[in-house]
Amino acid sequence: MSVVLVIVSLGFVGYLVFPAMDITAQEKPETFVTHSGAVVQTTGDILDPVYTIQEVEFDPQKYLREFDYGKVSYLEDGTTLREFTVIAEDDKMMEIAPGIFWNVWTFNGTVPGPTIRATEGDLVRIHFTNNGSKEHTMHFHGNHPAEMDGIFEIVGSNGGQFTYEFIAGPVGVHPYHCHVMPVEEHIGHGLYGVFIVDPKEGRQQADEMVMMLNGFDTDFDGENNLYAANTIPFYYQHHPIQVNTNELIRVYVVNMVGLDPINNFHLHGTLYEYYPTGTDLIPSEFTDMTTFSQSERGILEFEYEYTGRYMFHAHLTEFSEKGWTGLFYVKDSSQLNTEIYDYGS
């Protein structure tokens, strides 16, 4: 136990004082088994030992740029049909921080669930199965018929099924989540995800990523003990997100933190154009900090001119000290990233 406390303490100090980085190590990626259990390429000095402890079933690095476009077919009238399969479970244990295990309720085995993506006007069909021991639903923010709202259409436990079908819209970034009472409990345990609706004309090519802001009340006292971007506290501090200079970066941000009235997103080293909910293709402001209530969301677009490490974090000190903080590692645009990202279709 004392070792765990020391490690967590080091994680906190790491937030305040960043050690010198060996750029040589940065340029020579190595393969490690991360705290998420996935094998990924990372770089020498930025790997913290606390992230090699134990396998869990979620990889924030993979989730960051992973989009589910569904199984695509076309109707006789030319409409694009996108079909998805989503399975709810509520019996998983996940190590969300060193030595801290949490009973997560999942869509397709992860918290958050898959990032579902479609184009405005597509017909979205979601085959939902509830393999949990409790009743669950899927409620999408956005446009849909009343019978597809996921409120009164309760899906029974142990194999209950329901098919959600609606036309994708409006354009933007929207959350989806279980809406069974008590909603706070179902969301608090992890039954939520991101739904992106692209405009028909598309958006400018960019390095796209999703950040779900979440929190965990691990001692059930009505206050969150841990905060994160994409579930694992401090993950992107220990595994900085690699981006290139002079390249457009687009971040879809959704805040699903409960028990706290607000959350926010602050970016170092540059400012971003902000699109609230993403429903308007013209940004509303040029800023470096945005405040969100629960389920509030938006799209951030920005570029970095200079190389180096830049923080992004909650500008609520308690949140950042408890895990909601990370780093962008900006490389010269003449150098390739260590991964090539496929944005699907």
Image (tube, grey):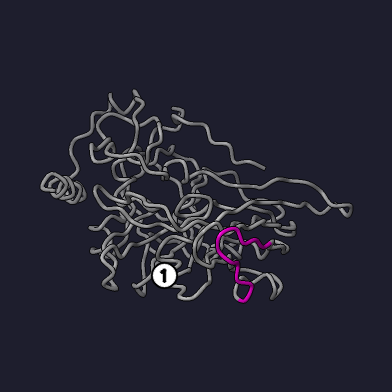
**Based on the displayed image, in which of its 4 quarters is residue 320 positioned?**
bottom left
Residue at disc 1, secondary structure: helix
Residue placed furthest toward the right: 76
Can you say whether 262 is above or below 227 in the image? below
Any magenta on residue 209?
no
| Disc 1 residue crowd, few under 14, some 14–19, many 20+, Cα 10 Å | some
Question: In the drawing, does residue 63 fall left or right of residue 314?
Answer: right
Report which residue position mark 1 lands on: 185
Q: Position of residue 153 (x, y in %)?
A: 64, 72
Can you say whether 46 is above or below 188 in the image? above
Can you say whether 161 is above or below 326 in the image? below
Residue stretch rendered in magenta on the structure: 152-162
Question: In the drawing, does residue 182 fall left or right of residue 74?
Answer: left
Q: Where is residue 150 in the image (x, y as percent from the top left)?
A: 61, 70
Residue type indicated by callout 1: Glu
Residue drawn at point x = 38 percent, y = 53 percent? 231
Q: Position of residue 332 (x, y in %)?
A: 40, 32
Q: In terms of secondary structure, what is the magenta stretch mainly?
A: loop
Report the front residue among 231 and 186. Answer: 186
Question: In the drawing, does residue 85 fall left or right of residue 273?
Answer: right
Residue drawn at point x = 52 percent, y = 72 percent? 180
**Quadrant occupied by the C terminus:** top right
Can you say whether 244 is above or below 67 in the image? above
Residue drawn at point x = 70 percent, y = 57 percent? 124
Any magenta on residue 156?
yes
